Amino acid sequence: MRPEILNPLFAALTDLKGVGPQLAKPLTRLGLERVVDVLFHLPTGLVQRYPVDRLDDAQVGQQIIVTLTAQEYRSGRSPRAPFGVEAFDSAGDHVRLVYFGRTGGLAKKLFPLGEARQVSGRLDAYGDMRQIVHPDHVAEPDSAEVIATSEAIYPLSEGLTNARLRQLVEIGLERRPDLAEWIDGPLLALREWPDWRAALTRAHASPHDAPARDRLAYDEIFASQVALMLIRQGLRNRKGRAIVGDGRLTGALRLPFGLTGAQERVGREIAADMARDTPMLRMLQGDVGSGKTLVALRAMLAAVEAGTQAALLAPTEILARQHYATLQAMLAGLPVTIAILTGRDKGRVRESTLMGLADGSIDILVGTHAIFQEAVTYRDLALVVVDEQHRFGVAQRLMLTGKAARPPHLLVMTATPIPRTLLLANHGEMDVSRIDEMPPGRTPVDTRVVSIDRLDEVVSGLARHLASGAQAYWVCPLVAESETSELAAAEERAALLRLRLGADRVGLVHGRMKGPDKDAVMARFQAGEIGVLVATTVIEVGVDVPAASLMVIEHAENFGLAQLHQLRGRVGRGTAKSVCLLLRSQALSETARERLALMRDTNDGFVIAEKDLELRGGGELLGLKQSGDADYRVASPEQLVRLLPIAHDDARMFVERDGGIEGARGEAVRLCLYLFERDAAVPLLRSG
């Protein structure tokens, strides 16, 4: 339960005077619904205003503060025409104050004729005339309102002004309670950081106050690190059970290829974890095509050999059904019962699956999030495998582990290479295994960067590719054509390719389609009935068609490197040489050029991930904002890279040396966890 001292910060903004439904809309668009949200919505810029006595003392383009007197109103012939206020300074110099959007009434109210007003705004030139468009502040010279010469600028949404947001920030700052210090004393002194109340005041005063911003970023990162360590400690303290297979099923697997050295090494690590009565918490990293599914299957078979059940959780229905088909083929001839459960399964099929799980006749269940719904019960669930784990958060992973009488072993897999910084940031509660060796026979994909101007050549090349009997993917960044974007749309591209190649040779899948419709198109593509599959990133993971040896990604600069690497991994799965064409726009930033060049020059996902982290710098980190994972509102990517190792060490010291939540720093750190909403770890730890 949240400490009472923090309740004023978690009050809804709509409870505040003056925040009605109209203002709530732009606030909600920005994710600002509570007082604490506004406090953590830090400014990104600073405006400097220059007080002047005369307009002649100011330069065009400057933000100025000047006293003006309105002498005349000018309205246009149309109601939509701009409304003008002709005003003069104390020396008689002229400026026009311009208002757009039927705001003449407001302008007249702000500027009564013949009365002086203190005005701030940007001084511009329109022909030979000076003008200020929509002054940002207007005040009576003798009023208590003082126009600040320096003001922080916030990210805004339509319908919300900087001044109105600043008023809400002031309310939030007034509500800050005095909280005990949670940062280790020597570290706080070494960094010369202010306390958190002072840090908030300073951070909202200026985006350039590095110590204040670092202090708040550190608090957020530290809260995440403590939460992960408490979760790890809590799960480690819970009694699980040792699972050791006898080898009768894993030994009977008939595979056309042997295990790589990396698969064998990782398999031993997983087996050693499962043989302990402490629940396994292990992440399995492996590049696209490195053989993670086989490693997971062997672990699940060990659970079945021990007389228990296993479950494999996939983020999408397409991927769940792909896994189901793959595992069925691998298990052909073995006395293992495997079933699938997704949100689409209804009626008798669903009831039969639920009964089989409850009575133990189903050994392995594959499915989407439907497999941890309340109605689903297992006779004896001992191992949970989560694929593409970045689609699921800690809370969702814990929901599935709660389906067992005793905490099951947990193995999470990802083909998205994660830099060490982000492993610590989002998955610090886990041990990590990495498959860093590709199975023999997989040839690197030849990646080329091509200008979108050569689209006709690419389509002609695609036609020749299909004529040879091969298949291809064509990926677009949008589903439907957009008036506000020039990016390629999948529906539009599919229509054009059907005109060039024939309607029966082009399929289309995207996230807005119904599940059965998507599956039908995918089945036709896998059967070779469709030559080219036009898609959005719905095919990013899980689609396995060995005959597809060409991948075209349109407007590739608009995809993240992780996405590009995943999409490229859809080809190169057969014996034929595979090519990935990255179609780029003509106008590219330097960073976009570097990123596409990196994709061209290497197939190593781990190299790509580390470089992506370096290149993005101030941008969104790879995987950081995937659903379910920690969302950093205050810490920038640069701060995360710089401060996370320090926070990790301090969090570990708090848990291992200082006694954790029950120790001397415990109550203060508990406040920090609740403040940054990383408190899920607290009840988990205390429940044992």
Image: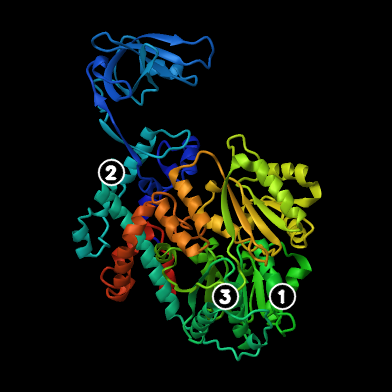
Amino acid type of the residue that numbered disc 1 sits on in the rendered structure: Gln
Instruction: Name the element at disc 3.
Output: strand
Which of discs 2 and 1 lies nearer the camera? The answer is 1
- Check the image and report above or below for 199 versus 428: above
Which amino acid is tagged 2?
His
Name the kind of residue labelled 3 in the image: Val
- What residue appears at the point 56 percent right and 80 percent down from the top-left corner? 405
Per the image, the residue denoted by label 3 is: 384
- In this view, the mark in front (1 or 3): 1
Judge the density around disc 2: few (<14), some (14-19), many (≥20) Cα neighbours within 10 Å: some
Q: Is residue 511 left or right of residue 400?
A: right
- Pick the front one: 498 or 176: 498
Label 1 residue SS: helix
Looking at the picture, does residue 348 appear above or below residue 453?
Answer: below
Quadrant of the rendered image containing residue 570: bottom right
- Residue 42, by quadrant, is top left
Would residue 125 appear left or right of 143 to someone viewing this image? right
Question: Distance of mark 2 from mark 1, alpha carbons?
Answer: 58 Å
Q: Is residue 492 above or below residue 312?
A: above
Position of the C terminus by quadrant = bottom left
Pick whichever, 630 or 31, lies toward us: 630
Q: Position of residue 286 (x, y in %)?
A: 53, 69
Q: Residues within 10 Å of mark 3 (few under 14, many from 20)?
A: many
Q: Which residue is mark 2?
A: 208
Residue holding disc 1 = 328
Residue 148 horizontal/vertical position (percent): 26, 31
| Label annotation for residue 42 | none
64 or 237, which lies in front?
A: 64
